[in-house]
Image: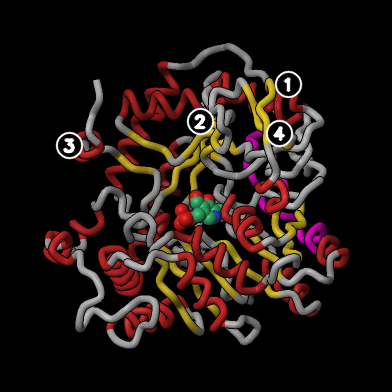
Amino acid sequence: MSKLIIEELNSIVDKKLISFHVPGHKLGKIYDKLNYKNTLNKIYSMDTTEIPGTDNLHSPEGIIKESQERASEVFKSDKTYYLINGSTCGIQAAIMALCPPKSKIIANRDCHQSVINACILGDIDPVYINSEIDKNTNILKGINIYDAIKVIDSNLDAKAIILTYPTYYGMTYDLKRICDYAHSKDIVVIVDEAHGAHLGLSEELPKTALEQGADIVIQSTHKTLPSFTQSSMIHIQGDRVNEGRLVSILKIIESSSPSYILMASLEIAVDIYNKYGTKLMDELLNNINKLKNSFKENNNIEFYDTNDKTKIFISTINMGLIGYELETILREEYNIQVELSNYYGSLLICTIGNDSNDFKSLETALNEISEKYRANKSIEKIEYPNNIPVKKLTPREAFYKNKKSVKIYESIGKICGEYIIPYPPGISLTSPGEIITKEIIDYILFCKEKGMNVSGLKDSNLGQIQIIE
Ligand SMILES: Cc1ncc(COP(=O)(O)O)c(C=O)c1O
């Protein structure tokens, strides 16, 4: 029977789902705790447009300008702009502002799909740096700096480099070294810090991208801080960025009716970050430590050592339970929702919106699961297809070519006409214009059978795939 969107959302609220996923406000819990309820109770009455007094996101001179200036101070940038179309639009604007048509950009291979989409929109040619994968967990660890330096050296004509930092799984690397090196070659550094808006809240967390010298940083405030989904920020520092062009592109790609609700939620997130953030982050890191310590002697429940400690990756593979199964059990039996799973485990995004009760519920659930689901079956291993496929066409050339559908195994060796993206994390294994490999097809068919979602394909059941004619 069909259900209304609003009915499903109501049922999640009524069940008081325990959220270890985005958005960072954790189903609004942090607003109640910190007394923002009175303001937010009126939020639908505040849904307005540009009228006298409300300023204009696309040429701010009043309250929006001042609000962005406060955010810039708090996040220690030279300039900050609010984004109401997510980090997606910030990434696209940054890339198109720095890279004219037919130019080159360097990107980490596990970049978000918005990077490749920016290359389609702007007719830009991406060159990739391989991403390191942990073979035991398939966790994306980020780039190796020596690989990055090699790619820079072989592509000195690139206008910019864009790097994901931290990775979705909370892994980091020596970003400062890459920023310094890129700058020495006159290459501008854009950092996709979609998963790291909270990093400035503790010395125990990795340094922020701005602290390490990035020129443009895009953060999904909504993912790890308490703002509403789709609200993000773009920060600029230094003088390598043509700010006027960046603003012009934002005007083109963002809505001409920017949501005041989203902008207000960004302002609230900045306020919470500034007034309560450090203390709440200390409490959060303490709760996470306690949880991990309580499983030190339990080999069934393994925690991966993430650099950003607010990301928890739990593997139950030792007890014969794959990540997709763990996710389903947590949701169906314990009312706990994780952010994503891969074959080897589940990733939980913890934010200052999570309280000690969330961690108690998680601890109880994991203890019970470790008793109840212990199985002596051994798990087949699957390697993440980590080789960068050969590129035959740029993403834009491939986008405008005619495509045809073929059976999935017949596509091997052909030029891909669409994205193959395990979702989440939304990172493309093959993009339009690249040669499809057997390694990739084997991987997606294996993981699909085990419970992974694959997006980007016209036939999401993976019967057929689009190739370039
Ligand atoms: C690494 C990374 N970058 C960018 C984005 C896009 O962010 P947004 O959802 O704010 O548009 C995502 C979204 O999941 C992401 O994982």
Gap between marks 4 and 2 measured at Cα = 42 Å
> Earlier along the polypeptide chain: callout 4 or callout 3?
3
Q: Which residue is mark 2?
A: 301
Q: Which residue is mark 1?
A: 409
At mark 1, the secondary structure is: helix
Q: Residue 378: in sight, yes or no?
A: yes
* Kind of residue sitting beneath label 2: Ile
Residue 379 % position (x, y):
63, 18
Q: Residue at x 61, y 68 (%)?
A: 96
Gap between marks 1 and 2 measured at Cα = 37 Å
Q: How is the image coloured?
A: secondary structure
> Earlier along the polypeptide chain: callout 3 or callout 1?
3
Q: Is mark 3 within 8 Å of ligand 1?
A: no
* Kind of residue sitting beneath label 4: Ile
* Kind of residue sitting beneath label 3: Asp
Q: Is 401 or 366 nearer to us in this picture?
A: 401
Left or right: 286 as drawn, with respect to 108: left
Looking at this view, name the residue that lies furthest to the right.
154
> What number is the disc on residue 14?
3
> Earlier along the polypeptide chain: callout 4 or callout 2?
2
Gap between marks 3 and 1 measured at Cα = 45 Å
Q: Is mark 1 within 8 Å of ligand 1?
A: no
> Dots 4 and 2: beta carbons under 8 Å?
no
At mark 4, the secondary structure is: strand
Which mark lies nearer to you, 4 or 3? 4
Which mark lies nearer to you, 4 or 2? 4
Above or below residue 89? Residue 430 is above
